[in-house]
Image: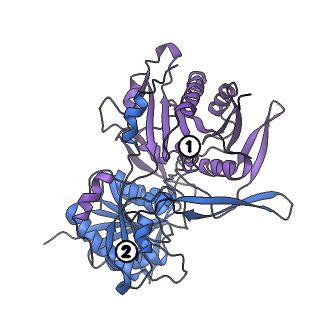
Chain colours: A purple, B blue
């Protein structure tokens, strides 16, 4: 008998989010799915891990059946705790998502969704993050979930080199308007952010971060451009941050006291 | 008259840490220094930013003089708030540190120290992170601070390409034992972490993360190897996470539903 695939699912929107629910439902047709996800929403936590306090784990039910483990920590905590402690055996794959909102361009480094998949990669397991690029409250995750199932099978078949994961963004359009899949690079767009200063009832000042993503890069092969063209964007990313092309330049600097 | 350099200093150990204090003291001989740093210690926060609550800023004095701004947020928040709101003009340089403990290998992606410098880079300012590779409580930051001052002048003179920052680690040995500076790449070492399960007084379970960094990579040009050889490690890192070498491979996968 063929061994059933084992897939770990996490996210940053929290264990009760619709995107995770729809993803799990699709994956259950091809794999045994283990869910370990944050108790609460954890957006923009970056690759945070919890070291200064301990973590709590709660078993969560749905429709009166065991559903998964809720952790009072970050997405990276969830994946670490799942693989190092909660799961008997390492999964074949880690999938993080489906995130409600895009993770493209520089947002990738702020993303809790991506960090859960990065942690899977660090622990030696093929991993991908998947996001639906809309903040619309009643977003439909069904096509993104179907795509995740197909991609899961492809990644298990082909494998990924150590240190590399996939960052997937799906445009929020009906299946018949999807114009294909493109392999992209991370766009160079940045956040044009600002702080809005306000006064609390005691007249003390506080600051809200607000801003919008500005495209600096208009080439066809970037993640955001794919989305604008109603294409699914798949970007291979890595946690080795070295800028190899600068190593030789810096060696000519003769830095020394 | 020559315009005085303007340097923004932040960190993740908090505004009152010794490493930041020593760094500022050295930099004041070459620049006007603005300090915007977390109120409290923020290690392992990754590149988190605060979006779901507002930020508070407190003016902090030292020796009865204004010292800097303490923010109840992450290192990335501090740099964003400094450049977008608190400083009249953009600084010439952002320096994050001096961190108490190393930021090498995969730790780079968990590092709050590195994230402050990354945020400077995202905002278009040459930036570096600097760490002293020891957890010894009475660590001496004076040589690392002197090195930071020299490197600051060098970076201002040479510039850095958009999107690239420097991650500097200084070994914790007396100046006369430092054996030079090497330009390194990020080591492939990983955390061999585990969770220790305990019971609270109410008999409920909780988990402490613990672990150690394991070297997978023994080549001479990596960050950790430099430190072991009593050399200062300078690694150029970037926030474009794309694995360019994998783009063509993925294009042969023919991913589609």
Residue A147 is left or right of residue B29, and the answer is: right
Residue drawn at the location 70% of the way across and 49% of the way down: A71
Q: Position of residue B119 (x, y in %)?
A: 40, 55
Residue drawn at the location 45% of the way across and 76% of the way down: B19
Q: Is residue B88 visible?
A: no
- Callout 2 environment at 10 Å: few (<14), some (14 to 19), or many (20+)? many
Residue receiving disc 2: B231
Q: Is residue A202 visible?
A: yes
Q: Is residue A239 above or below residue B75?
A: above
Q: Position of residue A121 (x, y in %)?
A: 54, 46
Q: Position of residue B220 (x, y in %)?
A: 39, 65
**For the N terminus of chain A, which image quadrant?**
top right
Between A109 and A87, the residue placed more toward the observer is A87
Residue A7 is left or right of residue A103, and the answer is: right
Displayed quadrant of residue B85: bottom left
Between B65 and B39, the residue placed more toward the observer is B39
Residue most extreme to the top: A176
Q: Position of residue B123 (x, y in %)?
A: 34, 52
SS category of the residue bearing label 2: loop
**For the C terminus of chain A, which image quadrant?**
bottom left
Residue B245 is left or right of residue B49, and the answer is: left
Chain hosting mark 2: B
Residue receiving disc 1: A117
Residue most extreme to the front: A1
Displayed quadrant of residue A63: top right
Residue A178 is left or right of residue A37, and the answer is: left
Q: Tally the marks.
A: 2
Residue most extreme to the left: B1
Distance between the alpha carbons at the discs numbered 2 and 1? 34 Å
SS category of the residue bearing label 1: helix
- Callout 1 environment at 10 Å: few (<14), some (14 to 19), or many (20+)? many
């Amino acid at each position: 008998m063929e061994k059933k695939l084992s897939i770990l699912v996490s996210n940053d929107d929290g264990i009760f989010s619709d995107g995770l629910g729809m993803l799990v439902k699709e994956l259950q047709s091809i794999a045994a799915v283990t869910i370990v996800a944050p108790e609460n929403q954890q957006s923009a936590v970056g690759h945070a891990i919890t070291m200064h306090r301990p973590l709590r784990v709660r078993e969560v039910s749905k429709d009166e059946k065991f559903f998964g483990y809720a952790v009072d920590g970050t997405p990276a905590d969830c994946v670490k705790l799942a693989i190092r402690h909660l799961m008997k055996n390492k999964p074949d794959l880690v999938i993080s998502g489906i995130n409600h909102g895009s993770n493209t361009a520089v947002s990738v480094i702020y993303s809790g969704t991506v960090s859960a998949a990065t942690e899977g990669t660090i622990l030696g397991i093929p991993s991908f993050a998947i996001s639906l690029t809309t903040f619309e409250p009643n977003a439909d995750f069904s096509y993104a979930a179907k795509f995740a199932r197909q991609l899961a099978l492809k990644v298990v078949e082909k494998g990924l080199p150590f240190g590399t994961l996939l960052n997937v963004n799906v445009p929020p359009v009906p299946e018949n308007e999807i114009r294909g899949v493109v392999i992209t690079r991370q766009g160079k767009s940045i956040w044009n952010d600002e702080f809005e200063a306000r006064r609390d009832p005691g007249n003390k000042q506080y600051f809200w971060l607000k801003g919008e993503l500005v495209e600096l890069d208009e080439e066809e092969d970037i993640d955001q451009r794919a989305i604008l063209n109603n294409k699914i964007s798949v970007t291979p990313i890595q946690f080795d941050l070295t800028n190899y092309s600068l190593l030789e330049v810096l060696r000519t600097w003769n830095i020394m006291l």
